[in-house]
Image (tube, rainbow, N blue to C red):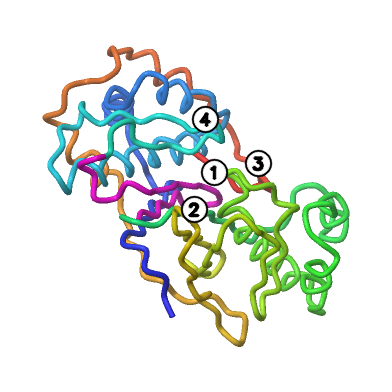
Amino acid sequence: MMLPAKRLCAVRHTNRMAAGTEWLLALWSIQPEEKERVGQFLFASDANAALAGRLMIRKLVAEKPNIPWNHIHLQRTSKGKPVLAKDSLNPYPNFNISHQGDYAVLAAEPELQIGIDIMKTSFPDCGSIPEFFHIMKRKFTNKEWETIRSFNDEWAQLDMFYHHWALKGTIGFGLGFEMHRLEFDISPLNLDIEEKEWAFEESKIDEHHFVAVALSKPDGSRHHSVSHHGDSKPSQRQFIILNFNDLIALIASAVPMTPEDPSSWDCFCFTEEILIGNGTKS
């Protein structure tokens, strides 16, 4: 079964995101503190993905109840999760974003607490796959490592590694759970969590990108079954794929939220990308 998440969006940020004028327009249309966070990323791809995440949230809120763009104010929880400062009119009060690999993704839901994480299966930069697994040894339980290493092919092992990582990342990053408290048995799915009852869904945007979504009733009172497939293959969940023009369509008539600063374009380091082995919360 599919989890009842109402909105799943993705932006392929490794495609052309924006020219200088479009980039500046987008930066001027987010809050100063969010602009500062975008500017802290070293690589162009990460900055693009983070900016896309901000714009996806604002688009989500602005479209439904027709809230003016400049009236949308985002805050951060103590765990870094973006939330609306005033969300009483928002049909999607629960949302989360993540970016890694080629995509930034957003999941939103009107009633349930929600988390999302995305991981791209790709070879590690530092050493071999066994060496990479050794470095990451403490990230998974013995049982999880048994599952990951149960495949003869190293690429399949790496694929399963990121499969597990995406599942843990749904509530281990933005929602604040410590990853070592989670243990997944891909068939079936088991959790070592007592405080909340969660349901998880695995899906793929394309051949190499795993996306996992976690849903929980805010009071933890309602149990949801796990979206699971006997062959352990993620479902092909339908994402709304957006491009940069979709994200800035509502900006043209918006009141700028950040003072214009043309030098911002020159402050980003568009250098050669390196592979990052972690999912990234925006």
- Magenta portion: prevailing SS class: strand
Tell me where residue 39 appears, x and y as whole percent: 48, 23
Left or right: 177 in relation to 158:
left
Mark toward the start of the polypeptide (1 vs 2) = 2
Quick one: SS at disc 2?
A: strand
Q: Which residue is mark 2?
A: 115
Q: Is residue 217 above or below residue 79?
A: below
Tell me the mark number nearer the camera, choosing from 3 and 1: 1
Q: Which residue is mark 1?
A: 174
Q: Amino acid at mark 2?
A: Gly
Q: CA distance from mark 1 to mark 4?
A: 27 Å
Q: Which residue is mark 4?
A: 270
Q: CA distance from mark 1 to mark 2?
A: 7 Å
Q: Is residue 142 above or below residue 17?
A: below
Q: Which region shows up in magenta? A: 88-109
Q: Give me the disc on residue 274.
A: 3
Q: Give me the disc on residue 45.
A: none
Quick one: SS at disc 1?
A: loop
Tell me where residue 112 appears, x and y as whole percent: 40, 57
For the residues bearing labels 3 and 2, Cβ distance under 8 angstroms: no
